[in-house]
Image (cartoon, rainbow, N blue to C red):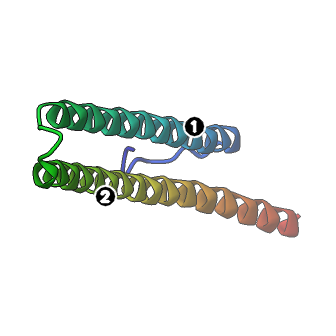
Amino acid sequence: MPQNITLPDDEETLASLYNQTIEAHNTYLEKLHAAFDKRCEQIGEETKQKLSKVPESDQETKNQILKEEQELLDKTLAELKYAINKSNSNARKKLEEIENKLDAKEVNVDEELANL
């Protein structure tokens, strides 16, 4: 998400930007989710391939392969959580900037009406 951009003054444009920010964030989260699912499937497939090459009686090696799989899945989940938290923070900051600008415009309209 872009940082430190100048927000427009028009309320309609601000409202549109607000909605676009939400849509862009949701699209990004969907892409993250799809990438996470794909990576988990890939890890699962790689594990199945490794396990298929290990004799049935070699439980120690199988357990090691499964442990490695769990570590990879945990790492992938941690990366997903980090990406989501970072994206949420950026989106929240942008939405707050837009809301603050909209609120400031409302105050100015109230002041102008009071001066009439």
Q: Is residue 10 left or right of residue 1?
A: right
Check disc 1 and report its element: helix, strand or loop.
helix
Q: On the picture, is 99 further left or further right than 28?
A: right
Query: On the image, which quarter does residue 63 sit in?
Result: bottom left
Front residue of 39/27: it is 39
**Vertical comparison of 107 with 40: above or below:** below
At a point 60% along the width and 58% down the height, the residue shown is 101
Sequence-earlier tag: 1 or 2: 1
- Quadrant the N terminus occupies: top left
Instruction: Report helix, strand or loop for mark 2.
Output: helix
Q: Are marks 1 and 2 in contact (CB under 8 Å)?
A: no
Label 1 to label 2, Cα distance in Å? 24 Å
Which three-letter amino acid code belongs to the residue tagged 1? Glu
Front one among 107 and 75: 75
Seen in the picture, residue 81 relative to 36 is either above or below; the reply is below
> How far across and how far down the image is residue 114, in percent?
86, 69
Q: Amino acid at mark 2?
A: Ala
Give the residue at mark 1. Answer: 23
